[in-house]
Amino acid sequence: MTDGTHSTLRPSTSTRRSSSLSAALPRAPIPAPERLRAPPVLLTMQRRKMRRDWSSLPDDVIAVISAKTTTYSMYVHLRAVCTAWRRALTPHPSHLPHQIPWLLLPRNPRESSSRVGRDDSRVSFYDLSQSKTYRFELPFLRGKQIYGSSYGWLVLKHDYSVWLLNPVTRRIIDLPPINIVPNGSSSLPRSEHPHQHCTQKVLLTCRPSQPDCIVVACSAATTPNWELVFCRIGDTQWTGLKQRVLRKRLLDFTVHNNSVYTVNNKKEVSVYNLQTLATWTYPPPIKYCPARDQINLVADGESDGPLVIYSPEYLGYGKKDKFHVFKYIGNKWCRVMDIGKRMLFLTSDNCTILQFEEEKGNKLYYDGMLSSTNDSYRIGIGRVNLKTDSNVTLETSPLEVCPDAIGSSSWFTPSLHLFSRSRKI
């Protein structure tokens, strides 16, 4: 522009070429701005606000939810949701159908959670209806033996001390020491082996929360002293009921209302009144072989006497092929093959009878040692139809039991009933 004329500036050839090349190349995406994140504390507070407060549900809504439960284990888990639900739900549900009791399994010290020594604080139950095993960690069990159960309470003993333990509610009831029995010289003596004089079976006449509950115990001693004793909740000593008789050994007993029924190795069935302490023996002895047969008694609410159950071909666990049930009818013992809507649950130490629906009744369940090896065995459950004598093996518990297991199996009916004079463990 030195000559004063106006001219237009144009890009050079190299500039045009570079601009066209840049237009042909793909443009890199523009990075999005980083999102601001709330601090972890604020996120936790927001999540808590979004959560439902299940403890604030109305009681009628909780009742509707509980009505959907069909098993006792489901109802127990429902009451364990929170304190509000536990208060809203009754400990004795009436809507649940009759439940098959759980099978208390022998305690296995090998499955201990402790790395040092033996730990027998774990107790396991097998639920046949759900095919599940429930385990309870109860430190109070350490060093104690379990002698069956009654009305949802386990019977524990250590030396002369005896307790009742509810594993579901974790409450215990203290009973008098078993060596404290009145009537002078007939009391249980002390010895260097106190376990020989402790209980081998304890039964309750009703739930401990009822005022007329009586505890009946059988002593395992072989010396001439009391064979059966009883007490009430809160007593400081036992009362003698049946003394030992030479050559007449007690094999089993059961309770019903205020009566205690016994059977001995002389085939005699007797009844003891807990109020008057009177005794009476059924005239004809029952026919069975004490040296060969296993015999159990169970209370029969439909008659004045007990039901007598024995296996005439008892060869050991897993080989109980036949069971006979006898009832006292017309001044004699008669075999019965129909017990109506009821079912019997039998182990080597106890027998329980429960009411069920008509299509499920008239059966007997029993335990047995199955799939045994040198190192362990499993507890199996069988079922017998009392009318047809048909025997069916149902299931085997998944828990392996070692030969040095503690205690024996027993049928257990869980209970949520509370008792004001029990204490928490």
Image: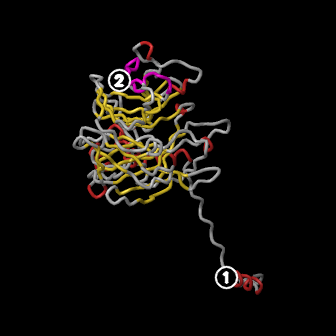
Indicate which disc, 1 or 2, sits on the residue closer to the N terminus.
1
Mark 2 Cα within 10 Å, few/some/many (few <14, many 20+)? some
Q: Residue 232, labelled with which disc? A: 2
Where residue 198 appears, as percent x and y from the top left, is 49, 27
Identify the amino acid type marked 2. Arg
Q: Which residue is mark 1?
A: 23
Residue range highlighted in magenta = 221-243
Colouring used for the render: secondary structure
Helix, strand or loop at label 2? It is: strand
**Can residue 88 be seen by looking at this rendering?**
no
Compared to 311, does 419 lie above or below?
Answer: above
Q: Quadrant of residue 195?
A: top right
Q: What residue do we see at 63% from left, 43% from top?
A: 110
Compared to 31, does 366 lie above or below?
Answer: above
Where residue 225 appears, as percent x and y from the top left, is 45, 21
Q: Nearer the viewer, residue 316 or 160?
A: 316
Q: What residue do we see at 34% from left, 54% from top?
A: 363
